[in-house]
Image (cartoon, rainbow, N blue to C red):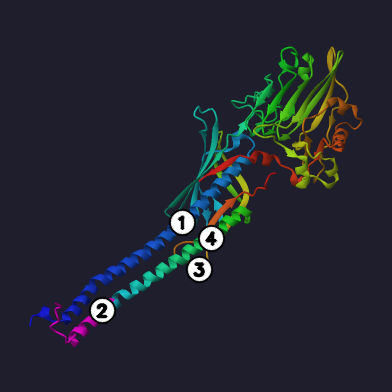
Amino acid sequence: MVKRCDSESGFTLTEVVISIVVITTLAGAFAPLIASSVRGIKLAGVRLQSLYSMRGEMERRLATFSGEKRRVTIKGRNQDGRADEWEVEGLQITVSGSGSEQQGEELLVSFVIPEEQPL
Amino acid sequence: MKLRDERGMVAIGGALMLLVVLPLLATALWQYSALELKNVQRGREDMQALFLARAGAEAVRQAWQQTADPKQRPFGQLDTLYFDLTTNAFTTNKPSRYLGTVDVEVREEAATADEVEKVTVVESTANVGSATRIVRLVTYPHRYGHQDPLLWYDPNEGRIPGTPIYTARKEPVIMRSSDGDTPISLDSRMIGHLWEGPPSVTFKASDIIFESPLQVVRRDDLYGADHGFDLVLEAEKIFFSGLEIARLNTIWDTWEYTVTLKLPTFDEELGLLGSTLLESNLVNVNDRGKIELSARYGQVYFDFNGRSVKVVPYTRFFILLPTGSPSSITPPGEGESPVKGYYFREEFRFDPNDILALRNGFDQYINEKVNEGVLIPIPVEHMVTRAHLERQRPFYWAQ
């Protein structure tokens, strides 16, 4: 046997108003947080995509030796234990990311010595 | 009427539930968002650190390789490198704004359990933000001919003792005396003891790179010489940095102290087939007709940077005298490549007697061998430089 509801009169106005007030307050309080979280998730996706594009570009340039000719000075000790320095010439490869950046530089940097392929 | 019997209280209850659930959901979403951003940030720093570490390792590897004297090569912990964001360049001085730091260490490690063979390790550690990446470059056992277990010559005196055959694995071997200038020569005892020693010594490797001059026999050793001698070099690519061969006329005979070039066989026959030279256009158009299709060719290079390729004639009648002038290959002119390279057909021997018999000496001899197709000039664009030979298997990455 199905038990019938003994009241079929619905919500009273007071109840509805209180509910609406509670929900609106809650939504108002958390809307900025939710919106900012959604924006953050979207931004993370965009930055991740940009990062992988940069990585791909960097690998391509490293493989094709396309960079800017630069000299790097290395300082330290030689095998004899004496202070020494060495200057090497190679290609500096810099790949910048697109879009705004708030947390540091969106930049990949490397250095490679171009080599001709032997026979 | 009891309060819990009011149906509307269900709605209020639901709203109050939202009071708990909605903040929880919003906080979870915010946490997730922050974590995602943090992950991307970490990924970015990690990637930046990886490429910076590679940059440091590559720069130090180049410094190591371009320094010919092993004692002058970088070793131990080197100064920290920074990537300066203001000048967009690497520097050893700490800048105010930098992308990250690179610390490189060069050290030797045992390559085998018995610690006989050692490898050089270039370990580069980059730090960007909170990320750290380490890459390693490791030399293949990069052998000098004087190192154990080869012991092809004494590095201080440059003398080759009397073992008939010296074989390396299929790898390049560098021939260099301690100071670089002392020539590598046959041991005097071998020159003067025909009955005790073999008439030739063979060095076998995939490539043989002479960083010191090869002077097959030294003048003083010819006083006691009682036979000629061949130094057989079995390698696919042979690089000379100065070569001196000799002829000795005596009352009884004429002896030659020279070099024979051969192609080695390891698990396969090394060298390039004549047909490959043609198909791959590795020779000048004028020389195409001289190629023997089924023959194998090696490569020999003469680096004329301050060093010559010559044959010296001597005569010995009780005392030793030079006979005439040495005959040299004319070095390349200014503006030309300082290196001359030839494909040599399997088993090529420089014949001092033939060279000295020719009016125009070594140059004419080379021209005749080129016309015979025994030596084929290598076009400059297909030459393998000394640096290439050194770099054939110098380092491998271990990331």
As for residue A19 lying within the magenta part, the answer is yes
Q: CA distance from mark 4 to mark 1?
A: 13 Å
Q: Chain of mark 2?
A: A
Is label 4 in a helix, a strand or a loop?
helix
Circle 3 SS class: loop
Front label number (4 vs 1): 4
Residue placed under numbered mark 3 in the picture: A99
The stretch drawn in magenta includes residue B23: no
Side of B105 relative to B34 (left or right) = right
The spot of residue B212 in percent (x, y) is 70, 31
Q: Which mark is residue B319?
A: none
Query: Is B106 on the left or on the right of B36, as rendered?
Result: right
The disc, 2 or 4, on the residue closer to the chain's N-terminal end is 2
User: Exactly how many numbered labels are in the figure?
Assistant: 4
- Subunit of mark 4? A
Amino acid beneath label 2: Ile
Front: mark 3 or 2: 2
Left or right, residue B74 beside residue B271: left
Disc 1 residue type? Answer: Glu
Residue B359 visible, this orientation:
yes
Neighbor class of circle 2 (other Cα within 10 Å; few <14, some 14-19, many 20+) is: some
Q: Residue beneath label 1, please?
A: B45
Q: Quadrant of residue B2?
A: bottom left
Between B92 and B340, the residue placed more toward the observer is B340
| Label 4 environment density (alpha carbons within 10 Å; few <14, some 14–19, many ≥20) | many
In the rendering, at what x and y percent does residue B307 appear? 76, 34
**Residue carrying label 2:** A23
Q: Chain of mark 3?
A: A
Q: Which residue is mark 4?
A: A54
- Is the residue at mark 3 from the same chain as the one at mark 1? no
Say whether mark 4 and mark 2 are on the same chain: yes
Q: Position of residue B98 (x, y in %)?
A: 49, 56
